[in-house]
Image (cartoon, rainbow, N blue to C red):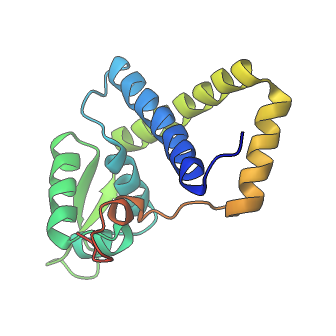
Amino acid sequence: MSRSGADLALLLLGGFRSLVDAATAELARRGYEDVRPVHDFAMRAIAAGADSASELGRRLSVSKQAAAKTIAVLQEHGYVERDTDLLDARRKRLRVTPLGFEVLRQGEAIFDELRDQWERQIGSEELANLERHLTALVGARPIRLNAPGWIAQDLGEPV
């Protein structure tokens, strides 16, 4: 039975959603009830150098206001903090806290566990083939950190 291109896109999105939903639920079971997928994207962008709301917004393809709201939530939960810039005392730079890095490590471990579950379901050879085919189709780095903004776009305009 042949499927349409739209079916393929929905299957891929469904696989992504299934993994992310399961990881979010497991993080909650491990005591991180407040973590959402966008928080992972934001903390990774901050760890990679997005040290202000403006820069985080650019990297996630969201508005500065949306980035600021995400930062506020992350600060409230102790996942990121603002430090004084050593070169400009008026400027505050974002950084991921040790707790934030722990959340990222927990998330990575959970995704490894979920991958292991998929491997048990379909077999190691089938999963390896799936990963090999996806890598051939989308490249070794299949997603940029701007996925939250990209998904929320309306007629090509980021929110």
**Residue 17, visible in the rendered structure:** yes
55 or 97, which is in the foreground? 55
Residue positioned 22% across, 60% down in the render: 82
Q: Seen in the image, is 156 located left or right of residue 121?
A: left
Residue 115 picture quarter? top right
Residue at 29% x, 75% y: name it: 155
Residue 158: image x %, image y %? Answer: 28, 73
Q: In this rendering, is residue 21 above or below 8? A: above
Residue 151 horizontal side relative to residue 126, left or right: left
Q: Is residue 63 above or below residue 95?
A: below
In the picture as drawn, the residue positioned furthest to the bottom comes out as 88
Percent coordinates x, y for residue 56 in the rendering: 31, 68
Is 117 above or below relative to 138? above
Q: Residue furthest front?
A: 1
Question: Quadrant of the image for the C terminus?
Answer: bottom left
Residue drawn at x 33%, y 58% as measured from the top left? 95
Residue furthest toward the right?
125
Location of residue 74 with respect to 88 vertically, above or below: above
